[in-house]
Amino acid sequence: MSTGPKIAIGTLSFFGFAFAALLLFYAVNPWLERTEIPFFGSRIRDTAWFGITALVSVFATIRLIQGKRWAWWTAVAVTVVALALAILLIVSVLHPRDEFAASEGGFGFCLALILLIPSVLSGVLLNLPSVRRRFLS
């Protein structure tokens, strides 16, 4: 394999492992921060859901490095979902419904950029002809 696809898959792997690390942070945080309100209703459920999702992310990223076709399709699907969420967030920031939404527009725009930049970069890297050829041939 040439250098281009290796760099692309390495960048995508970095995104996958960074996402898993963020999920593990969310899995452990309810036990470290006692005043936090659990996302799924209890600390145990938060730890279970975020921990399992992090393990799935690590597993799919490792399989992407190994060149599995299903991992490429999974990465494409996650990229499309993240891009759709970013666009939805940008639209909701540009058209606030009330004063609170208008006052939090900067935060929403920042979140949209945090979703938009990695998803666009991942989408471009996943669809490079040399990377796509590696997984679909």
Image: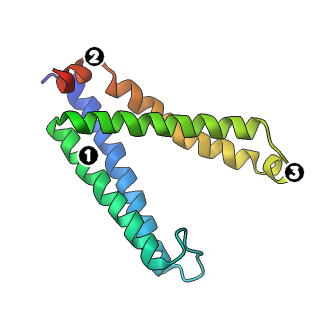
Give me the C-alpha separation between circle 2 and circle 3: 46 Å
Q: Look at label 3 and name its amino acid.
A: Glu
Q: Are marks 3 and 1 in contact (CB under 8 Å)?
A: no
For this orientation, the residue located farthest to the right is: 99
Residue identified by numbered label 2: 129
Identify the mark at residue 7; answer none if there is no mark.
Answer: none
Name the residue that disc number 1 marks: 61
Identified by mark 2, the residue type is Pro
Where does residue 33 sit, x and y in percent of width and height?
53, 79
Discs 2, 3 touching: Cβ within 8 Å? no
Dot 1 or dot 2: first in sequence order is 1
In the displayed structure image, the side of residue 120 where residue 3 appears, left or right: left
Which tag, 2 or 3, sits closer to the chain's start? 3
Q: Does dot 2 land on a helix, a strand or a loop?
A: helix
Residue holding disc 3: 99
Q: Is residue 92 left or right of residue 137?
A: right
Question: Between disc 3 and disc 1, whose residue precedes?
Answer: 1
Q: Secondary structure at mark 3?
A: helix
Name the quadrant containing residue 67: top left
Q: Quadrant of the C terminus?
A: top left
Residue displayed at 34% across by 37% down:
75
Percent position (x, y) of residue 102?
Answer: 82, 46
Quarter the N terminus occupies: top left
As drawn, 39 above or below 55: below
Q: Give left or right: position of 85 versus 125.
A: right
